[in-house]
Image: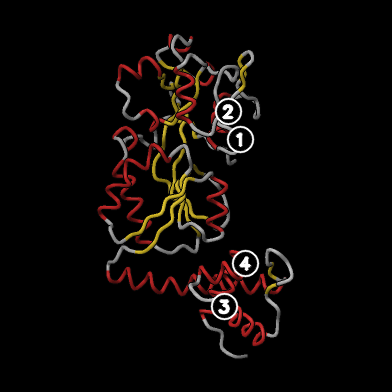
């Protein structure tokens, strides 16, 4: 068998990823005839057909899928050589795509992004706001380098690196009955007047779990039913005297103690918390960037999250059981 080039492996991997020869060629910065010719040469040398070109989008054949999967493994190892050289030189550089869930993005990103980009100017950081399942899928497809989300996931091939534990709290409408309490417990909560994120958000499931009710029931008040994809939208509605919601503690950063007293109630011990982690593929690359990212996130956290002891009485909430 003739030698296989890394370039050919890159081309078939990109065709598999995009399911389109033209898009793959653009991604590889070559003409489509060049890409097609190299893939055809590889097929001739191997004596197999890798892609069914009659289908739209293009699909790999059964043997083609196995070869593409092996090609991706080889490409990962080639890239690892580059990372070893960077590590030897002490370099922290390159493109890094980070996924982050919507219930963390608006509160966590402002804490560390500016310092990270100033400290590591040679890192081209691309941040995408994605739901948990989207991050998992993109990690498997090597379309993101890492994700910041709530764990445990318990997905084979994904490394979970816990960064901090974030308590939940209750955000209440003016004159809500729960404001009469100094602290609340899950037994005080009901789904009858709670505002929830819509389906697909793990925070929705976590809120329902805390309320100890059946999944799927949504807030309904007289002739109004509403679900949102944004916690800030829920907060604004609650400010207009509609029920309550649960929030992660980072969501009230910037609120004064006086404002918190009018809107917020913390939980009694044991406090419901969520574990926030940076996750990445088990065959991960860019180790130096991941390490720098973890350190920057930790250093940016407010003191109360840094000092949340592992032996404090908490209930860890996750929608992945």
Mark 2 → mark 4, Cα distance in angstroms: 37 Å
Mark 4 → mark 3, Cα distance in angstroms: 11 Å
Foreground: disc 2 or disc 4: 4
**Residue 100, how many percent across, how many down?**
46, 46
Foreground: disc 1 or disc 2: 2
Foreground: disc 3 or disc 1: 3
- Residue at 38% over, 69% down: 83
Mark 1 → mark 4, Cα distance in angstroms: 32 Å
- Residue at 60% over, 21% down: 219
**Residue 312 as seen in the image, left or right of residue 318:** left
Q: Is mark 2 on a helix, strand or loop?
A: loop
Relative to residue 107, is residue 266 depicted above or below? above
Mark 3 → mark 1, Cα distance in angstroms: 41 Å
**Residue 21, how many percent across, how many down?**
61, 71
First-in-chain label (3 vs 1): 3
**Residue 305 as seen in the image, left or right of residue 190:** left
Count neighbours of disc 2 (C-alpha within 10 A) and say few if under 14, some if 14 to 19, many if 20 or more. some
Q: Quadrant of residue 165?
A: top left
First-in-chain label (1 vs 4): 4
Residue that mark 3 sits on: 35
Relative to residue 93, is residue 311 depicted above or below? above
Q: Is mark 4 on a helix, strand or loop?
A: loop
- Residue at 62% over, 90% down: 1
Relative to residue 153, is residue 315 depicted above or below? above
First-in-chain label (4 vs 3): 4
Mark 3 → mark 2, Cα distance in angstroms: 47 Å
Q: What element carries label 3?
A: helix
**Residue 206, how many percent across, how many down?**
54, 32
Residue that mark 4 sits on: 20
Q: Which mark is residue 199?
A: 1
Residue that mark 2 sits on: 227
Image quadrant holding the C terminus, namely top right
């Amino acid at each position: 068998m003739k030698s296989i080039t890394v370039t050919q492996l890159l081309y078939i991997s990109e065709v598999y990823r995009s399911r389109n020869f033209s898009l793959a060629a653009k991604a590889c910065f070559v003409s489509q005839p060049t890409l097609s010719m190299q893939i055809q040469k590889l097929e001739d040398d191997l004596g197999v057909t890798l892609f069914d070109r009659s289908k739209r989008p293009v699909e790999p054949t059964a043997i083609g899928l196995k070869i593409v999967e092996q090609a991706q493994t080889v490409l990962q190892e080639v890239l690892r050589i580059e990372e070893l050289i960077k590590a030897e030189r002490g370099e922290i550089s390159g493109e890094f795509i980070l996924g982050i869930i919507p219930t963390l993005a608006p509160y966590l990103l402002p804490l560390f992004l500016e310092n990270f980009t100033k400290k590591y100017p040679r890192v081209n950081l691309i941040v995408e706001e994605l739901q948990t399942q989207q991050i998992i899928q993109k990690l498997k497809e090597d379309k993101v380098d890492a994700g910041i989300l709530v764990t445990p996931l318990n997905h084979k091939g994904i490394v979970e690196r816990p960064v901090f534990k974030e308590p939940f709290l209750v955000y209440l409408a003016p004159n809500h009955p729960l404001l009469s309490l100094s602290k609340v417990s899950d037994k005080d909560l009901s789904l009858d007047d709670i505002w929830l994120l819509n389906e697909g958000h793990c925070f929705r499931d976590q809120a329902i779990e805390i309320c100890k009710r059946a999944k799927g029931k949504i807030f309904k008040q007289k002739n109004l039913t509403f679900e949102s994809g944004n916690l800030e939208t829920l907060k604004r509605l609650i400010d207009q005297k509609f029920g309550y919601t649960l929030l992660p503690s980072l969501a009230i950063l910037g609120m004064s103690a006086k404002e918190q007293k009018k809107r917020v109630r913390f939980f009694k011990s044991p406090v419901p918390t969520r574990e926030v982690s940076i996750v990445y593929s088990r065959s991960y690359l860019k180790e130096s960037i991941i390490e720098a990212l973890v350190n920057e996130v930790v250093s940016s956290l407010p003191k109360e999250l840094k000092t949340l002891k592992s032996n404090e009485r908490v209930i860890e909430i996750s929608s992945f059981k």
